[in-house]
Amino acid sequence: MKASRRMVLVSNRLPTTLESGPDGPALKPSSGGLVTAMRPVFQTRKGYWVGWLGEGRQEDVERLLEPRAREGCELVPVALTPSERKGFYTGFSNEIVWPLFHDLQSRCNFDPGYWNSYTGVNRKFAEAAARVASADALIWVHDYHLMMVGECLRGMGVQARMGFFLHIPFPALDIFEKLPWRSQILRALFQYDVIGLQTARDQRNFLECVRRLLPEMDLERVDDEVRARMDGRVTVIRSFPIGIDFDEFAHHAKQVEVTRRAEEIRRELGGRKIVLGVDRLDYTKGVPERLKAFQHFLATWRNLRRKISLVQVVVPSRESIPEYHDLKMETERLISQINGQYGDPGWTPVHYIHRRVERGELVALYRAADTALVTPLKDGMNLVAKEFCAAQEGESGALILSEFAGAAEQLREGSILVNPYDMRGVAEALHAAYRMPRTERMERMKKLRRTVRQANVFRWCEDFCLYLEGAEAAKLRAAS
Ligand code: ADQ
């Protein structure tokens, strides 16, 4: 890629969030999969990152961002009023699109007032991007919060190449059809030159919706990409499964302090087998369902009680939404029920950590764990599954993975796939992982690590950028 073409990345959140601390406002790392994935990418290229920084005064924002502007990637904050945040973020994005695209339509609140706020805020993001984008810039818009940004940019006369990547699943036609603004959104997406989805499943669903809702679109499949033509514009639709910075995780996992901390965790848990869950506290991640499966496991295999503990780490998320508060209550109720029912003075069945943990501690937990239990009800990809594999320095951990996580498409071979709604099935998978001979676990983990290493986040970014740069770059790649 030509170094001169600056990237303008647009996402709901910037990689840092303004928070008030004991010494006044400070920048803290933002949480979530998108930021985790994009942070290493932006350390290697120049450009602008447009997004929301959190609530704060303009002078604090400018003072705190100024030193970063000198580091190559300039952060461009978009200021939002509380009512915009409510309608656009809490409302349209997280009470409509998020549950619907995860097949949980009964959780949707199709409040008609949210739409104006969504389009208005998308326009604000587009204006901020247009201010910094040169004519040959590459504009890369991320995720479901900002589906209309491309259309707004074209409306402002921006001709630069533009791509959109959806980090969450794209639902099947019979679910997408329920969205009252389905045609506006689908049509707007075709203002981008590239539409990137996580998996082949999402690409299939997306195309089915296009065939049904935009029948005038001319679709042509060329290998794994589909070219869509309408009104003289060609848009490429392709899956780009997101990865992680494998080397960074693997390297971190080998550090003496991490090794020591992993041993300490094992000791603290009495040398028992450790099953690990790590999630943003979100109803799509299937935490209560997982706890019930663990409860079922303890009820079924009485002889394994005291020999195993579940460590469930959750990072607080979207706490302003009542449903997320209810989920926290439900999770804590189930944990205390299990611990009350089965625990004794020398054994706690479920250890619960409800906070963001530092990278070193997270990697130590991944290393200490014998089994990762990654059971989302539906997930675009799921980076935790990949991070666990990358941190398996001894290559002997087992991965139990939901078949509804995007990651299951790549990690089928090597993991134990489960239906997260099937409590008995998940309990049986836990039992199978417990009993699995070390040689088999190592063989499986070797395969998993190979896949995660190859399909890493830099490869993902490079692939997407080749398409974003245009047909020529994509052709060059195909020929190489
Ligand atoms: P998320 O829904 O946020 O991402 P995920 O892919 O699992 O989900 O990423 C979560 C990230 O947060 C991981 O990097 C994990 O390490 C980190 N994390 C979780 N709990 C933590 C804790 N307690 N402390 C510190 N860190 C924690 C969205 C989509 C996913 C998609 C990603 C990237 O929903 O499907 O994989 O974007 O595209």
Image (cartoon, rainbow, N blue to C red):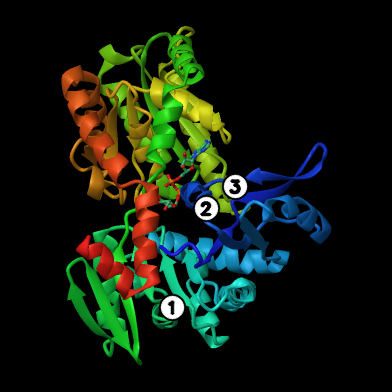
Q: Position of residue 220 (x, y in %)?
A: 20, 79
Rate crowding at label 2 as few (under 14), some (14 to 19) or many (20 or more) other CA atoms within 10 Å.
some
N-terminal of the pair, mark 3 or mark 2, is 3
Quadrant location, the C terminus: bottom left
What is the CA distance from the residue labelled 2 to the residue labelled 1?
A: 28 Å
N-terminal of the pair, mark 2 or mark 1, is 2
Q: Is mark 1 within 8 Å of ligand 1?
A: no
Query: Could you tell me the amino acid type at mark 2?
Result: Phe
Q: In this orientation, which residue lies closer to the viewer: 283 or 342? A: 283
Q: Position of residue 315 (x, y in %)?
A: 54, 39
Q: Is residue 52 above or below residue 257?
A: below
N-terminal of the pair, mark 3 or mark 1, is 3
Circle 3 sits on which residue? 30
Res. 213 image quadrant: bottom left
Q: In this orientation, which residue lies closer to the viewer: 69 or 364? A: 69
Rate crowding at label 3 as few (under 14), some (14 to 19) or many (20 or more) other CA atoms within 10 Å.
some
Q: Position of residue 430 (x, y in %)?
A: 26, 27
Circle 2 sits on which residue? 42
What is the CA distance from the residue labelled 3 to the residue labelled 1?
A: 27 Å
Quadrant location, the N terminus: bottom left
The residue depicted at 76 percent of the width and 56 percent of the height is: 61
The residue depicted at 49 percent of the width and 36 percent of the height is: 331
Visible residue check, residue 174: no
Left or right of 267 on screen, residue 85: right
Res. 271 image quadrant: top left
Instruction: Tell whether label 1 touches label 2 (CB within 8 Å).
Output: no
Q: Position of residue 265 (x, y in %)?
A: 47, 16
Circle 1 sits on which residue? 185
Query: Could you tell me the amino acid type at mark 3?
Result: Ser
Q: In this orientation, which residue lies closer to the viewer: 437 or 36? A: 36
